[in-house]
Image: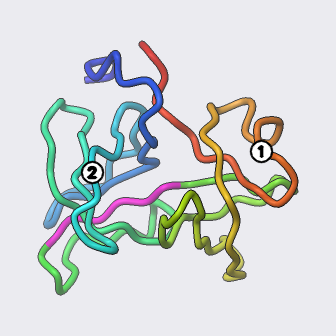
Amino acid sequence: MAGSISGKAGQIAVTAYRPFGGSKVDSTDAYIVSQRASKLFKIALDDSSTGVYCMKAVAPGSLANDNASGYGEFCVQLILNDSTVAYVEKFYNNTVHYVTAGGATGNAKYTLGTEGDDESNAGAGSVSVDVITDK
């Protein structure tokens, strides 16, 4: 249900998620609601429901539907200042630990941006994480 989650501007956007035992959903409206553990987050899904999912630093096509934890999985994509695509492995103290598609890792302060201004919002040494905008 695209556009069903409105008025949540500023929430960190979920790039894709995969329910346990289900199919991958490339999301336009899902977002992080709250953190439950170092890798577990409550997320609002595209159908307006919520669930606890495990964050993985992988491309959407690599999200598993049958992991050992019993939780669904999701990913958060970010764009580094040099336009490299990366995935968040961990959020902490306004910082992300990320993994690029090529396997390189790093840490950077993050700012909240929107698609289209990813690089321009991030200052030197920081990255921009997409957020939900009002629909």
In the displayed structure, would residue 70 be above or below residue 25?
A: below
Question: Is residue 48 placed above or below 45 in the rendered structure?
Answer: above
User: Label 2, on which residue?
Assistant: 34
Q: Quadrant of the N terminus?
A: top left
Q: Position of residue 122 (x, y in %)?
A: 77, 45
First to last magenta residue range: 71-76
Nearest the viewer among 51 and 121 is 121
Position of residue 71 in the picture relative to residue 85 (left or right):
left
Q: Are marks 1 and 2 in contact (CB under 8 Å)?
A: no
Q: Name the residue at the top extreme.
A: 135
Helix, strand, or loop for circle 2?
strand
Tag 2: amino acid: Ser
Q: Residue at x 64, y 35 (%)?
A: 113
Disc 1 marks which amino acid?
Answer: Ala
* Secondary element at tag 1: loop
Q: Position of residue 49 (x, y in %)?
A: 13, 37
Q: Residue at x 34, y 16 (%)?
A: 7
Tell me if residue 30 comes above or below residue 5 in the rendering.
Answer: below
Q: In the rendered image, which residue does mark 1 sit on?
A: 122
Q: How is the image coloured?
A: rainbow
> Is 122 contained in the magenta span?
no
In this picture, residue 13 sits left or right of residue 46: right
The mark that comes first in sequence, 1 or 2, is 2
Task: Find the distance from the CA under tag 1 to the CA under tag 2.
Answer: 23 Å
Identify the residue at horizontal 19%, vertical 58% (top origin): 19
Q: Position of residue 69 (x, y in %)?
A: 16, 82
